Structure formats: C-alpha cells, structure tokens
Image (tube, rainbow, N blue to C red):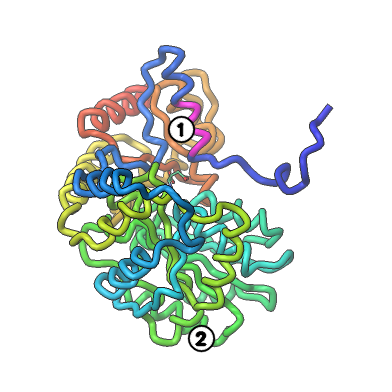
Amino acid sequence: MAHPLSNRINSLPVSQTLAMAAKARELKAEGKDIISLSLGEPDFNTPDFIKDAAVEAINQDYNSYTPVDGYGELKEAICTKFKRDNNLSYKPSQIVVSTGAKQSIANVAQVLLNPGDEVLLPAPYWVSYSAIAILCEATFVEIPSSIETDFKITPEQLEASITRKTKMVFFNSPNNPSGTIYTEEEYRALAKVLEKHPQIYVLSDEIYEHINYNNPTFSFAAIENMFDRTITVNGLAKAFAMTGWRIGYIGAPEWIAKACTKMQGQITSGTNCIAQRAAITAVLAPVSKVQYMVDEFKSRRNIVLELLGDIEGFKLNIPDGAFYVFPDISYFFGKTIKGKHIKDANDFSLFLLEEANVASVTGAAFGAPNCIRLSYAASEAILREAIKRIGKALEA
Ligand code: GLU
C-alpha cells in the first residue's frame, strides 16, 4: 500500500542531477569503475584564503543564530560585489542570504507564485526550476530552443508564450546545461517584450557568472526599467568551489526581499554562521583570485569539444560559460547498439552508464529531449578516459 504522503511531495519529481550522482556513487561503492560527469560541481578545493576566514570565524566563536536575512556585513559585501561586477545598486535591505542559490530561488517562487500562475522557462533550463514551480502549484511553460540557435530563445517566442496568467520568467546566463550566454543586446530585446507586460517578474539566475570564457556576462537587472521587477540570484558554489558551504543570495525589490526573509524565518532561521563569515571574504575578493579555475575549465572545454567532435552523431555548440557540454545526440534515436534499443535521451544516458561506465544527465530533465549533459568539472585525464570509453561503446 502506498504511504500516506502529501499530494505535494507525490507530485514532485526527483532532482535528476542529484539522482544520477547518487546512482554513480552507488555503482562505485559496488566496485564498478564509474566516471561521473553528472554533477555540476567544481573538482577544485575551496581556496585557502576562504578556508582561513572560516577557521578564524570558528575561533572567534561565531556560533549563534544569525539575522534571518544574513549578517549585515555580508549583505554590505554583496552590495559592493553587485556594484563592482554587475553595475547594480542594491541596498542591504534588498539582499537576502540563503542556504544555497537553490533555496534563494525556492524562496522567491514561494513568495510570488499562486496556484495556477504561469512561469516561463526558456529551455533548456536547470532541472529544479520546473520542480520548484510544481511545488508552488504553478504551471511551468517551456519556451523551446535548439542547438541550431545556440539554445537561445527569441523575443517573438517570448511574446507568444505570454498569457494573462504569466507571473514570472526565469533567465539563466551562463546557462546550465547549455553554457549559452545572452549578450546585452539579446537581453535588451527580450526586455522590450516584457515592458509591455508589467505583471511579469524576472528571476535572473547568475550563479555561473564568473565562469565565462569571452566577455563579462550582463545582468538582466542592469536594464534600467527592469531593475524593479527583477530578482538577481547568485551564490558562491561555482566560482569559489564552495558547493557544500551552501551560500546563495538575492538582490531584489525590497518588498520581495522582506517576504523571502519571512519565508526562511519559518523554514531555516537563516544560513550557517561560519559559511557566512567566510562568504564575506569570498565575495569581496577580486575575481582574479579564482581565475585559475576558470582558465582550467576553458582548457578542458576545448579538449572535450575536440574529442567529442570526433565521435559520429555528437552535434555540439560551443558553450561560452559554465562547465557543461550539451550535445544533441538525437542521431542515435531509433538505433540498436550492443543489443540495446535507444529510443530517447534517457535510454542514451543509461546506455552510456551501462556500456561506457560514464554517468551523464538526460536532456529530458532540462526540457531538451534531444540532448544529454556532461559536466567537464573533472580532471583532463578523467575527461579523456570518459570520452574514450564513450567512443568505444558507440563504435559497436
Ligand atoms: N547545480 C548543479 C547541477 O546542475 C548541482 C546539482 C543540483 O543542485 O542540481 O548539477
């Protein structure tokens, strides 16, 4: 008999990124030689200057509850960062620090969405956006794109997706999973459409901001008349190799920040005090201090693109940021390889796990059913081995 769980949890899909990482861990524990390219997690250590700040905080006896929305000093530091990197003038009262950018996004969705509201998700989109919308009993509406358009949507598509019920749109640049970056011009063209629909709020997830390989990224809230309806989400996990420290934050209109504080006051009481103290140091550090990781990601991206490009059936775009490749592998649909029939990206991802011992994530989880995601946040040797195995499994 089914357990009497709530409809809420029963309707929630499992996070495919975390599920695939867990599956890879399980198989490894059974003794299988699995290479996991499933999780988006830097393989670097947290830089020493940040670790030192955490140790100092412990020794200074930071152990009490923090203000629900974060230490004042950290919020000031985040304002400085927003001005320095994004040309955004937030006040500390517009900042809320949370337990990871994922909680920041969940807070914003919870305080803005009512059942039946529509949330526009330009696809491909990070797996948890749709799940968070489901938790709010909102309806998520995909705006499709493909590798042919470098996974970008057009203003016309945005316009066509808007209804009376549209309450929010989620932008994410650099994008997880495609690595695509919207230019200022492209963002301005999308903003033009939104100008006509003042009831729509924009969540701009900029967690991969510093992991970009060409030009600095552009913040959606920097568009003059979008500032008051945009929630800018960021965090420390990716650029500072601090995934487990769980620090995310928003800059938002004050009334939204206040509502998010009220929400997390009933859920977490605020974020870990030691991680917050360390975050002050991280946020204020010049970006040049973590450039060595970005340089390394770029060199790996180039290697991965070159090696995957040699495998027949892998269609690739050139991701300008983040640390994922998102090949279109629809070439393999309908084929039978090593006795296994591949009808879709789920089958293909499973095939790679079983026949190449390489864990990926199916594009279906990101609203892009022709693709799979491979994270290249792994050493060059591991990446070379993984792609060699993929090539070999598919040769058959
Ligand atoms: N954001 C990362 C990913 O997409 C971490 C896992 C998660 O929270 O989804 O792999």
Q: Secondary structure at mark 1?
A: helix
Front-most of residues 208 and 326:
208
Q: Quadrant of residue 42?
A: top left
Majority secondary structure in the magenta region:
helix
Q: Is mark 1 within 8 Å of ligand 1?
A: yes
Q: Which residues are magenta?
A: 18-24
Q: Residues within 10 Å of mark 1 (few under 14, many from 20)?
A: some
The residue beneath circle 1 is 21
Element type at mark 2: helix
Whether residue 133 appears in this view of the structure is yes
Q: CA distance from mark 1 to mark 2?
A: 41 Å
Q: Where is residue 36? Give x, y as percent.
A: 38, 30
Q: Position of residue 215 (x, y in %)?
A: 22, 66
The question of residue 179 being in magenta is answered with no
Q: Quadrant of the C terminus?
A: top left
Q: Is residue 308 left or right of residue 260?
A: left
